[in-house]
Image (tube, rainbow, N blue to C red):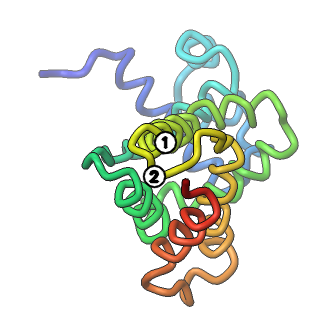
Amino acid sequence: MARTPSKDAHEKVLQAAYDLIAERGLEGATMDAIAAASGVSKATVYKHWSNKDALLLDVIRRLSEKYPEFNSGDARADLTALLRHLAYKAKSQELAKIWPHVISYAMSNPAFGRALQDFAFQPRREMVQRLLEQASVSGGLRDDVDPEFAMDLLIGPIVHRRMIDEKNMPPDFPEQVVGYFWKVFAR
């Protein structure tokens, strides 16, 4: 099936945006520069995306994969599996190349930061909350565990280790993190 001109333009803009972000960062990837690099008119770019932030989120969406389901019925095992996935799953090379630019931009642009959180982190947050509720109902964890705080305690060490010292992450690090969390919040 042949692509329509609009789909072709859409893909060209996404690729040009990615290339410019990788080369110049977000500040250098202006809508004018993206339109010029893609060979697509600025009017067409704005027909597909209302602003640069919306375009950037589409670039990230294109490079991201969905989280696997962690739903074995054993909340502790599922939390460990989620952390293992976060600890050892390699980002796509393309996403890894622009991710520092994305985070930097999110830090200086609160509206984009919130949109990035909603897109990239909310599904993970909902998964952790579901697993905590499941553990509470089954009697494994206390009822008063704050899901936001739990996210920080569970995912924070994994993110920190990936950013600071990924090569020296112990093979059982996710199990250690969940184990300590369980000791503190067990019934």
Out of 161 and 91, give the one closest to the viewer: 161
Out of 150 and 109, give the one closest to the viewer: 150
- Residue type indicated by callout 2: Gly
Residue hosting label 1: 136
Q: Residue at x 55, y 14 (%)?
A: 44
Residue 77 falls in which quadrant of the image? bottom left
Asked if residue 8 is positioned above or below residue 25 in the image, the reply reads: above
| Residue 63 showing in the rendered view | no
Secondary element type, mark 2:
loop
Query: In the drawing, what numbered circle is on residue 140?
Result: 2
- Residue type indicated by callout 1: Ser
Q: Quadrant of the N terminus?
A: top left
Q: Residue at x 52, y 31 (%)?
A: 58
Asked if residue 70 is positioned above or below residue 125 in the image, the reply reads: below
User: In this view, which residue lies farthest toward the left?
Assistant: 1
Q: Quadrant of the C terminus?
A: bottom right
| Residue 119 showing in the rendered view | yes
Judge left or right: residue 40 versus residue 66: right
Query: In the drawing, what numbered circle is on residue 158?
Result: none
Q: Position of residue 47 (x, y in %)?
A: 56, 9
Task: Verify CB contact (< 8 Å) between mark 1 and mark 2.
Answer: yes
Q: Position of residue 104 (x, y in %)?
A: 78, 52
Residue 2 falls in which quadrant of the image? top left
Asked if residue 169 is positioned above or below residue 66 in the image, the reply reads: below
Q: Position of residue 18 (x, y in %)?
A: 55, 45
Q: Position of residue 163 (x, y in %)?
A: 66, 72
Alpha carbon separation for disc pair 1 and 2: 6 Å
Q: Residue at x 69, y 20 (%)?
A: 51
Judge left or right: residue 126 versus residue 102: left
Secondary element type, mark 1:
helix
